[in-house]
Structure formats: structure tokens, C-alpha cells
Amino acid sequence: MDAQTLHPATSTGIPNRKLAIWTFIGSECLFFASLISVYVVYRGKSLVGPYPSEIFEIPLVTAGTALLLFSSLFVVLALNGCEQGNRKKFLGWLAMTILCGFFFIGMQVYEFTHFYHEGLTMQKNLFGASFFTLTGFHGTHVAIGVIWLLTVFFEGVRGRVPPAKALNFEIAALYWHFVDVVWIVIFPVVYLMN
Amino acid sequence: MDSSAQAHEHNFPERAGEYVRIGLILFVLTAAEVGAYEIAHRPGVPLHEFMHTGLIPVLVVLSAIKFALVALFYMHLKWDGPLLKGIFSFSLFLAVFVVLALLMLFIYQGTFSAIVGPLLGAAGS
């Protein structure tokens, strides 16, 4: 099957699926903007502890942030390999991306568990409610991204993602980058500006 | 068909070096963010006074640069057409507007009520 059959001409000149993922990303910007606003509005308004400065572990979250940033680099290198038909580069970097995603989720699970044992729950105070809602939704997006990338990885192992079908992977990669971009905003707003 | 021939056929440029350079810049900027936070919270270290008062603007600028680098280079917006750039820019504009509108609404709610409330009361009577 040639590239023309796989990606038929559109009136916009852009594949419809790529246009769709960008529109979806646009709507997600508004979704996370609302959650971030709520967190900022409720900042410092909790009447009882634990408060952010008492329980945040900045080194741990910084490591998670670095992993997510590196995963964005790895996924773009994997896409580059996929587009060039370099299967080893494609699958190797993609595996690294998925690994980083798992580590990030692990970091967040550890953090949430730790906070719970420190007495912070969604019902405890405004900080708990807004923090768990914001970072929980982001973590869910990361988990969905990992599942999506795993699907692409197994398809790649079976040889079903040739350069002509690189768009399938590019769409997943765009979603993954968006998850990273959202964390680029969440990390300073939630953890460093408290 | 070998990999270079396939890449040529589909016109995909080699950008691995550029991606790695951007990755390093992102890493340095993240380190700068955490460094700024540490300076702001440790009295006695150089630049503490400046960072203590200017931490938020510094973090906003650094994260905006990181955001732009990922969107332009990793998400390929730099090389994409105006339609995709427009969709993302418009969404981003709306998102920033939502954030600012909510902040204004809640932070200045008291001030707003104090000014407008009596005026509305006077108009009503």
C-alpha cells in the first residue's frame, strides 16, 4: 500500500487524523487551564493542614520531571527512526520512552501514597482537593499515553509501522508531547511557587 | 529498500542532532528552575533577595521557554503549516484567557464587590 493510499489528499493539505489530534490537544489546553486556575485560586486558602510546604518532596518530583522531559526527547528520536525506516532506532527509543512513562507513574503513585499517609486526602482541605484533581488527571493522561505507546511498540515489533504509516506513531507522539508540555506548566506552578 | 532510500522517498529529514540539543537546553532550564527555587528558599546565599521577590516571574519565563521549545521543535509546529499553528495558538490564547479571567474573578472579587456593590445599591434605590 503506498503513502498516497494511506494518506489521501485533503482540502486542508493536512491528514484529517493529524488535524483531529491537534484540535483535541487544543481542547485539552482549556481543560488543564481550568484545573490549574482552580489550584492557583485555592492556593493558601486551606484552613487545616497538611500544607504544600510541609509535604512536597522537590528532589523526587524534579527527577520525575527530568524523566518526562527525556521521554519527550526519546519519543521524537523514535519517530525520527520510524520515518527513516530504522526499526532498531524506532523500537529502542520507543522502549526508553515507555520506561520513562512507567517511572513517572511510579513516582506519582509513591507521592500520592506518601501524602495519604501524611493525612492529605481530597476531603481534607482545599489544597488536597485541587492538588489531587490536577495531578491525578495529568497522571491519568500519562497512563493513557503509556498504553497508547505500548500499542504502537507491539505493532512495531510485528513490523506493522513502516515509514509510510509513521503518521500513526506521530499522532501518539503528539499526545505524549502534550502530556509533557502540561507538566512543564504544572511543575513550577504547583511545586515551586508554593 | 534500505532505510536512507525510504527516508528520501517519504522526505523525512534527519533531525536527531537538533532534538538532542533541544533536550539539553530543556534539561538546563529545568535545573535553572529548581536552582531558582532553592536560592529563593535559602537565606544568605547570593541572589536570595532577588529570587525571594522575583521567583514567580523567573519561573513563568523559564517554563514559557520550555513550553515553546517542546511545541516548536518536538511537536514540529516550527515546520507545520499555518492551520495547525493557528489551532494551537488560538487554544493557547483561550487557555491563558481562562486562567487570567478566573484569577481576576477570585483574587479581585472582594475589591470588585466593594466598588461595584454600593454603586448597584445606589442605582437600585
Image (cartoon, rainbow, N blue to C red):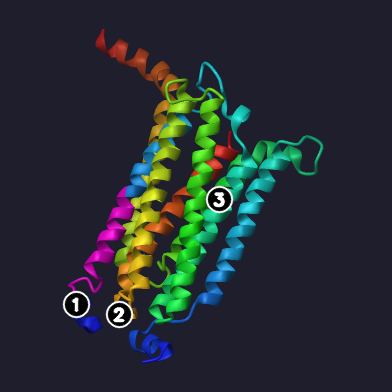
Identify residue for label 1.
A9
Which is more N-terminal, label 2 or label 1? 1
Look at mark 2 in the image and give the residue it sits on.
A164
Q: Which mark is residue A65?
A: 3
User: Who comes first in sequence, dot 3 or dot 1?
Assistant: 1
Amino acid found under the numbered disc labelled 1: Ala
Image location (x, y in percent) of residue B52: 69, 36
What chain does mark 1 sit on?
A
Residue A74 at what x, y percent from top left? 50, 66
Quarter of the image with the N terminus of chain A in it: bottom left
Q: Is residue A184 visible?
A: no
Q: Residues under labels 2 and 3: Cα distance?
A: 33 Å
Image vertical order of residue A83 relative to residue A18, above or below: below
On the image, the x and y values in percent for residue A186 come to 49, 43
Mark 3 or 1: the one toward you: 3
Question: Which span is picked out in magenta?
Answer: A10-27
Under tag 1, what secondary structure?
Answer: loop
The amino acid marked with disc number 3 is Thr
Q: Quadrant of the C terminus of chain A?
A: top right
Mark-to-mark CA distance, 1 and 2: 15 Å
Q: CA distance from mark 3 to mark 1?
A: 39 Å
Q: Residue at x 18, y 80 (%)?
A: A5
Give residue A91's quadrant in the image.
bottom left
Task: Look at the image and say whether residue B33 sits in the magenta stretch.
Answer: no
Q: Quadrant of residue B90?
A: bottom left
Marked residue chain, label 2: A
